[in-house]
Image (cartoon, rainbow, N blue to C red):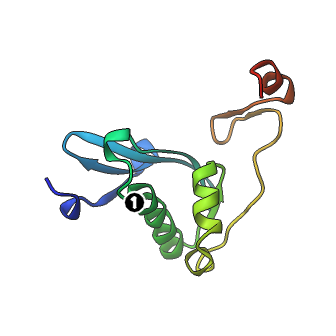
Amino acid sequence: MTEGNSAVVDDRQHHRFVFHQDGIDAELVYRTDGDRLILVHTEVPDVLSGRGIGGRLLQAAVDRATATGEILVPWCPYARKWLADRPDLSGRVGIDWDRPAAAGNDSRAGITSPTPESEEAAGG
């Protein structure tokens, strides 16, 4: 399968945008909270890196938010940078730039945010 024939699919059942090529998945994991599309984590395996696939995953999120009126909430560092670097695209949708709570769990998204103490213990 060639990259040009691969499309990003919104796998709503598993809460991810996925790009599948040659048996390998790249994904942008998300959660929803009402009208908010929370972008949690982008992962592109090394074998697929350097091909703009991460950007294609983010473009799919922008396209969905444009179509549905959802507000993008980029918690993923890659998503934050990608959107910030493309104001022409990010200007098409509402974006909540607030980061998740500095400590504790956000049960709505199933995400545990590190506390300052845990980051310090990890050498951060």
Q: Nearer the viewer, residue 102 or 52?
A: 52
**SS at mark 1 in the image:** loop
User: Extreme left residue here?
Assistant: 1
Displayed quadrant of residue 107: top right
Instruction: Work out whether 66 lies above or below 56.
Output: below
Q: Amino acid at mark 1?
A: Gly
Residue 120, image x, y percentages: 83, 24
Q: Nearer the viewer, residue 96 or 120?
A: 120
**In the image: residue 54, left or right of residue 33:** left
Displayed quadrant of residue 116: top right
* Residue ID for mark 1: 52
Residue at image position (66%, 50%) is: 75
Mark 1 crowd level (few <14, some 14–19, many ≥20, 10 Å Cα): few
**In the image: residue 39, left or right of residue 9:** right
Q: Nearer the viewer, residue 107 or 48?
A: 48
Residue at image position (52%, 75%) is: 66
Instruction: Work out whether 45 lies above or below 53.
Output: above
